[in-house]
Image (cartoon, helix red, strand yellow):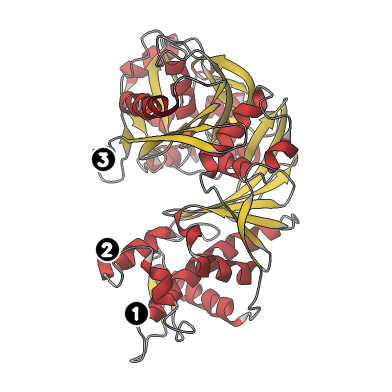
Amino acid sequence: MILSIDAGTTGVTVIAVNLEGKITARGYQEFPQHYPQPGWVEHDLEEIWQATLSAAGKVLAQVGNTFSAIGITNQRETVGLWNRKTLVSPCKAIVWQDRRTTEVLEELKSNPAINSVQQKTGLPLDPYFSASKLRWLAKNHPSIWEEVSKGDTIVGTIDTYLISRLTDGAAHITDASNASRTQLYNIHTGAWDQELLELFDIPEHALPTIVDSSGLLATTNPTAFLGIEVPITGIAGDQQAALFGQTQFDVGGAKCTYGTGAFILQNTGDKAILQDNGLITTVAWQLSGERTFANEGSVFVAGAAVQWLRDELKIINSAEEIEALAKTVTDNGGIVFVPALTGLGAPYWIPDARGSVFGLTRGTQRGHLARATLEALAFQVKDVFDAMATTGVKLNSLRVDGGASANDLLIQIQADQLQVPIERPSNLDSTALGAAYLAGLGIGYWKDLQTLRGLNHFETSFTPENTSPEPYKRWKQAVQATIAFAEN
């Protein structure tokens, strides 16, 4: 079987996948989150490693050591440091959510090289990405950074760290999809960019070697990893792995993960289409040296809006109840909810925006707010796909995953808004499956992409029914009003 390790932001999931693509065993282990100051988010790398051992141990307890290869997928942009020989980290990793590096980026704005960052990387200047986090560490922990400069301490994203631990320090690698999230990687050349390394003052010798997302990449050390000695043959960042796991291999194919937020990726083929529409250009995966690219948009609040109804307003007792409540009414009763509870993400990028509800009357019921919440999730995703349409890449299919994708009413509303069929696969573990597929492909366990398409069958298809443009028109008016309120 294939062992797939999915190192997320709050925990590590490990699954075993057999030749038919079925998940035969699963293990999960949470790890702590550290918030030393407002806006700071950190992880202890050793705690992530121990969670990985624990989750993998649970899988081995179920199916034994019966693995041909390992695939790895991970939270992206989070970056850490560790000693090249001892693998001990001198400080905590800075997590993708961390905002402490805003000041670092401000200081760099006078540097002429700053103007080429988005052109080279496909990424806007933002604390989200890894480069400014490393720059912050260099400025604020000079003694630690001296070890980096000397070559004794190395740096990397979570995939790189896990591979260091799995191989007992023998491999220091990352794949192109993870490298493309650091803001140090040139998406056109497929290599670390010298001008960017100088801009952020990062020594290249500390960075991992960039490899394919699939192939014979490294081998685990049995003394380091539960007695397992097998090749590591698949690596991808979590959202790219989900696109692969949803088998969206064709240009125009897309996936939307409805989690706390919503992450939308669309395959653009071998072209890196740079944008100024609030979206990101990223490497989706690299196979046999050939890169496939994707456009990406992030919605800050998706499932979190449902959690808000449950935890703060208490109009539902569980997230699953929202569908039944929304169905107690035939429409939204004239209300529009803009769930900018933590600002507006793509394609607006208005961090100071706040949530708003328009159209309340004495007749407004709980069901109207529930329905308006589901509509808001669908409208936000349509906003991203409308921005993606400006690239000229047509949306030809959409696959969905994540917890909220189990909501039939939400996905029907989404199909109505996008006017394309939406497929929901029987297996929603797209991220871990994507890493497994890449690993299996890397050793010939599965022959080719066509074989992979046959593994993750869709369970339910939703076709467009309601074509009225009016609800979305009212949504756009509500968003503009919300933005105006934030600016005053």
Quarter-of-image position of residue 466:
bottom right
Residue, disc 2: 311
User: Residue 399's spot in the image, x, y percent?
Assistant: 61, 54
Q: Quadrant of the N terminus?
A: top right
Residue positioned 66% across, 26% down in the render: 445
Residue, disc 1: 366
Residue, disc 3: 35
As helix, strand or loop, the secondary structure at mark 1 comes to helix
Q: CA distance from mark 2 to mark 3?
A: 22 Å
Which of the pair 138/476 is nearer the observer? 476
Tell me, yes or no, if residue 90 can be seen here.
yes
User: Residue 133's spot in the image, x, y percent?
Assistant: 41, 33
Label whose residue precedes the other's in the sequence (2 or 3): 3
Given the image, on which type of amino acid does mark 2 rest?
Answer: Asp
Tell me, yes or no, if residue 238 can be seen here.
no
Residue positioned 26% across, 66% down in the render: 312
Which of the pair 26/104 is nearer the observer? 26
Residue positioned 48% across, 76% down in the render: 478
Given the image, on which type of amino acid does mark 1 rest?
Answer: Arg
User: Residue 474's spot in the image, x, y percent?
Assistant: 54, 80
Of labels 3 and 1, the one closer to you: 1
- Do residues under tags 2 and 1 come within 8 Å of each other at their CB atoms? no
Of labels 2 and 3, the one closer to you: 2
Residue positioned 50% across, 58% down in the render: 405
Label whose residue precedes the other's in the sequence (3 or 1): 3
Classed neighbour count for the residue bearing mark 3: other residues with Cα under 10 Å, few (<14), some (14–19), many (≥20): few
Above-or-below relation of 369 to 182: below
Left or right relative to 429: residue 267: right
